[in-house]
Image (spheres, rainbow, N blue to C red):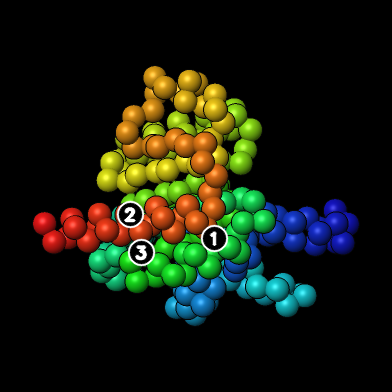
Amino acid sequence: MNTELLVKSTASKDAERSISTAQAARLLGMSLTSVQKLVDQAEVHAWKTPGGHRRIDLASVRGYQNKLYIAPGLNIKARSLPILKVVAEEESTSDELKKELAKWSTSFEASFWGSLPDAFLSFTAQSPDLLIVQMSMPLNQQIQTVLALEKFIERGRKSMSAVCLGCSKDLKGKVKHDVRSHVQLSPQPLTSAWLDAFLTGASICSSVGRRA
């Protein structure tokens, strides 16, 4: 085989097996700084490309996710705040929602996700107590999303609740025989005003529950 083709083939395979630091952070639900610490501690494997870009071995990230899933007490500090994850794929509202989430840092361990697949993958490392999803996709994908959430919750995360906003008016009729109380559906759009009102109510209920 031509040497140049062999080099290109090897580089291509390495690229398929690796991800960027930002992608690793999204998968693990961590900050870029935390991922860098994992690299320094050899918890995940990384290298730099000839162009100076850091690549992280995907298999090592999966392995670390499994490690957290099997023995979470070894690497995650004890927490008292409920975990909240918000998913909104529309860029027009992302900055506004991120600012709103920042106001609630003392009441929730909150994170914002711009991609539903990335949010789902992060559940391996850290499942949320509450998930809020902006349903901006077509009806068929909305149905698949709701059923996937219900299946995930029923399979072992029954303390988790999900709220899907911006739902198609036809969605409830399509999934009414499959969806139980774990997933709430609403045509209401996800806005910072709605998020503020909802988290105010959730925070009050959480405080009352802790005092009971």
Q: Are marks 1 and 2 in contact (CB under 8 Å)?
A: no
Q: The disc labelled 2 sits on which kind of residue?
A: Gly
Considering depth in this image, is 192 or 121 the residue closer to the camera? 192
Which quadrant: the C terminus?
Answer: bottom left
> What whole-number distance in Å separates the C-alpha atoms at marks 3 and 2?
13 Å
Dividing the picture into quadrants, the one containing residue 48 is: bottom right
Q: Is residue 42 above or below residue 64?
A: below
Precedes in sequence: disc 3 or disc 2: 3
Name the residue type under label 1: Leu
Which residue is found at the position 54% from the left and 64% from the top? Answer: 98
Q: Few, some or many C-alpha atoms within 10 Å of disc 1 (few <14, some 14-19, many ≥20)?
A: many
Q: Are marks 3 and 2 in contact (CB under 8 Å)?
A: no
Give the Cα separation between the discs numbered 1 and 3: 14 Å
Image coordinates for residue 20, horizontal then vertical, percent: 63, 65
Vertically, is 193 above or below 149? below
The kind of secondary structure element at disc 1 is: helix
Residue sitting at 61 percent across and 41 percent down? 136
Residue 36 is marked as none
On the image, numbered disc 3 is attached to which residue?
108
The residue identified by callout 1 is: 97
Position of 31 with respect to 72 (left or right) is right
Distance of label 1 from label 2 (alpha carbons):
17 Å
Q: Position of residue 71 (x, y in %)?
A: 29, 59
Q: Nearer the viewer, mark 1 or mark 2?
A: 2
Q: Give 20 or 160, whichever is nearer the viewer.
A: 160
In the rendered structure, find residue 201 and report the number of the disc placed on it. 2
